[in-house]
Amino acid sequence: MMRVADAMPARPETDAAREEPFLPTRRSLLSRLRNLDDAVSWRDFFDTYWKLIYNTARKAGLSGAEAEDVVQETVLTVARKIQEFRYDPAAGTFKGWLLHTTRWRILDHVRRRQRHLEAEPDPGADDSRRTEVMEQLPDPASERIDQVWEAEWEQNLVDAAMQRIKRQVKPKHYQAYELYVLKDWPPAKVASALGINLAQVHLLKHRVGALVKKELRRLQERGI
């Protein structure tokens, strides 16, 4: 799905870029996005936000193809407007600005559906059926979009925390946590599959879990 960053010139990834914590939104990332030639930062932005935008569009009632278009159109809009954005919590957050941008892109697709229905009505359908179809179109102005966005944003935080910790701990340690906590495997099965004892399984659950919770709190505090 990554077409925006693919279209940008390649740029070597620096050690600082690799070491920088994975955050849902970073002031440093927003600053770097002002350079449209910074393909690394734009890929970071896309990888962080595309699922949030896509899931919101889908749960707003759009099809998979329409949601993919919303992702691309939203990222392109951010690219065009990022120079105008100024971080000011009193005036509004980036989170709210991105939601506003996503909502308008969703609305664009709803309007296209409406125009299509009005221009090419089904000759076999009666007026009541056509009215029913029109009424089923998603309403981007509804509170549901805000609720979906909040839920998806929180999930985005969790995913970000998990990915960050996954890069920090040993692969087997993370795998034990993932199998036990996320996939709900019995501890004995986890121990057998990974060649470790039961005590280690329980210990890794608590150690990795504590790291995830700490990272999640940090993301919640620093998210813009």
Image (spheres, rainbow, N blue to C red):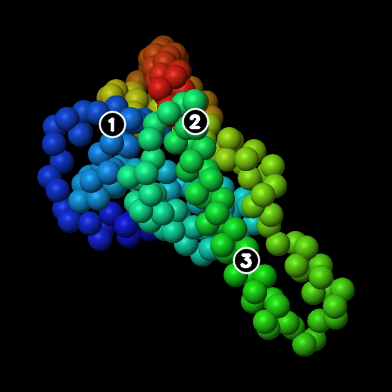
Q: Quadrant of the C terminus?
A: top left
- Distance between the Cα atoms at labels 3 and 1? 36 Å
Identity, as a three-letter code, of the amino acid under mark 2:
Ala
> Depth-wise, is mark 2 or mark 3 nearer the camera?
2
Out of 84 and 175, give the one closest to the viewer.
84
Identity, as a three-letter code, of the amino acid under mark 1:
Ser
Asked whether residue 173 is in view, the answer is yes
Considering only vertical position in the picture, is 154 above or below 71? above
- SS for dot 1: helix
Which numbered disc flags the more N-terminal residue, 1 or 2?
1
Labels 3 & 1 near each other (Cβ < 8 A): no
Which picture quadrant has residue 208?
Answer: top left
Pointer 2 residue? 91
Apparent side of residue 33 relative to residue 72 in the rendered image (left or right): left
Which numbered disc flags the more N-terminal residue, 3 or 1?
1
| Residue neighbourhood size for the residue with mark 1, other residues' Cα within 10 Å, grouped as few (<14), some (14–19), many (≥20) | few
- Distance between the Cα atoms at labels 1 and 2? 19 Å
Labels 2 & 3 near each other (Cβ < 8 A): no
Identity, as a three-letter code, of the amino acid under mark 3:
Arg
> Depth-wise, is mark 1 or mark 2 nearer the camera?
2
Which picture quadrant has residue 116?
Answer: bottom right
Q: Position of residue 153 (x, y in %)?
A: 52, 35
Apparent side of residue 98 relative to residue 174 in the rendered image (left or right): right
Out of 203 and 216, give the one closest to the viewer.
216
Q: Position of residue 38 (x, y in %)?
A: 21, 47
Q: Position of residue 129 (x, y in %)?
A: 83, 74
Q: Residue at 28% x, 24% y: name it.
A: 168
Q: Position of residue 98 (x, y in %)?
A: 47, 43
Looking at the rendered structure, which numbered label has been put on residue 28?
A: 1
Looking at the rendered structure, which numbered label has been put on residue 111?
A: 3
Q: Residue at 38% x, 56% y: name it.
A: 76
